[in-house]
Amino acid sequence: MSTSITISLEKSSKIHAPAPKTVSFPNNSSLKHSLFLVTLFIFLLLFIQFKALQSPLHFSWPLLGSQLSDQDITSMLRDSVTFLPLKDLRFSKEPESGHTWFMSSINDTFEPNESEYLYFPSNSSKGRLLCFSAHDPHDGAKNSYAFAWREALPHGAILLPGLTYVSDTYYDHGNLWHGLNAIAPFIAWNIRKGCVAPARWVLFHWGELRTEMGKWVNTIAEVAIGKAEIETFKGIEGPTCFEEAVVFRHNHGAMSKARVGEVYDRIRCKAREFCKVGMDKIRDKKDVQMTLFLRTGARSFKNESVVVSVFEEECRKAGNCRVKVEKTDNLSFCDQVRLMSETDILVTPHGAQMTNILFMERNSSVMEFYPKGWEDLAGVGQYVYKWLSDWAGMRHQGVWRDPEGPPCPDPSDKLQCFFDFKDRQIGHDTVYFSKWASKVLQDMKEHRQAIPVKGNDLSATRTNFCQCGTSV
């Protein structure tokens, strides 16, 4: 039997109140019994917690969780390290967009005027280090990476001390042009961070491990940054983690034109210093030097002697001018630096040897030549040395495209046509070459006359600053 209490709700002036509600309470004996059980439960709970606080074993009630030791936590963190493929095949159709297919789980850090980069350890990595398990030179999807706290590195991992430069490029580290673009952001980073050389390089191409740079590219890296070994992971079976690492995977990326120019000024200056090129004597010369930098084989001139004679004749007519003829395949690195430092006007076929124009003085001139077929088939790649001239402070004076030659054997196969035209030789047009050379020579003379006082030419003096931290 229970006691009922009826509660009446006030009526609204506009809305009828609902029917009275009835709330039932248990009788007195049942209520007393329930209160006794609740009181007993609370007492037991407080007693158990009191005993737990007194216990030297730090006993805690299982329902409230168990206490872990530092060793347990470290073990859990180590077991939680997850390795992911370096090359993410989900982005195989757009490897250069977004955050790329290389280490795709983490976004880049952006700074004004600089190329996008990743840095470890950092806030974006939550203080974790970068680790690689990467030995495959053929399939980037078989190589992997992970992030781990220094106190909980992956099982079997070794930790390499110092700063590591990690480069991934969609192209390669061998070709002069592509290799230069890959290492340029590292040179910018090196300047900003006090010019301290890294302990090592780690190189990837499409996530595939590379164990060397091209000889020219490696020399540029050494003279501009400092000597550092290229990590091969030879003899290392487990993962490798790095105490400090910076990763560039976009080549120039978002670097501003001014910033790229500063990087190339630094390369020019350090290369001349390395090769002991005395620029004071070069800048004092009265004659304009026109250099014909000729190739052998693909994209060489069909009749070199005629081409050379045309430029020699125009140089003779201009006065205070001399022509120097060199082949690209018989010069050392320092020979190339010295030759380009002396050159006021460069005459050369399109090709990787043109990367050496960055050793020329600012405001020098470049004349470029192509075989038949490039304009329609080579895409934006045919403009790379026009871009480089602009970035490095040269004046690209245009191009000549050979209009003569047989058609492509199979016009329906565009790629094969490109390769066919790419390896052809270049003809000549005596009349056009003469007028072009005369115009460029006159332009160079006018530029020299516009320099009012010796040593007051900013384009020349910019290359004098080799000390770290100097604005260039």
Image (cartoon, rainbow, N blue to C red):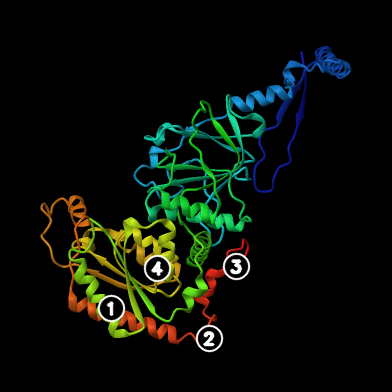
Q: Is residue 433 above or below residue 175?
A: below
* Residue on which disc 3 sits: 471
Residue named by callout 2: 453
Residue 250 seen in the figure: no
x, y percent for residue 462: 54, 71
| Residue lying at 76% horizontally and 28% vertically, measured from the top left | 6
Residue 357 visible at all: yes
Label 4 amino acid?
A: Ser
Nearer the camera: disc 2 or disc 4: 2
Residue closest to the eye, 91 or 162: 162
Disc 2 crowd, CA 10 A, few/some/many (<14, 14-19, 20+): few
Pointer 2 or 4: first along the chain:
4
| Mark 4 Cα shell of 10 Å, populated few (<14), some (14-19), many (≥20) | many
Look at mark 4 in the image and give the residue it sits on. 389
Q: Looking at the image, is mark 3 or mark 2 nearer the viewer?
A: 2
Determine whether label 4 and label 1 are within 8 Å by CB. Answer: no
Q: Which mark is residue 417?
A: none
Residue at position x 54%, y 81% from top? 456
- Marks 2 and 1, the one that precedes in the sequence: 1
Q: Amino acid at mark 1?
A: Ala
Q: CA distance from mark 4 to mark 1?
A: 18 Å
Q: What residue sits right under mark 1 in the picture?
A: 437
Rate crowding at label 3 as few (under 14), some (14 to 19) or many (20 or more) other CA atoms within 10 Å.
few
- The alpha-carbon separation of the residues under discs 3 and 2 comes to 23 Å
Q: How far apart in space, not on screen, are marks 2 and 1 (Cα)?
A: 27 Å
Q: Are marks 2 and 4 in contact (CB under 8 Å)?
A: no
Q: Secondary structure at mark 1?
A: helix
Residue beneath the point at 34% across and 77% down: 322
Amino acid identity at mark 2: Val
Q: Secondary structure at mark 4?
A: helix
What is the x, y in percent for residue 68?
72, 22
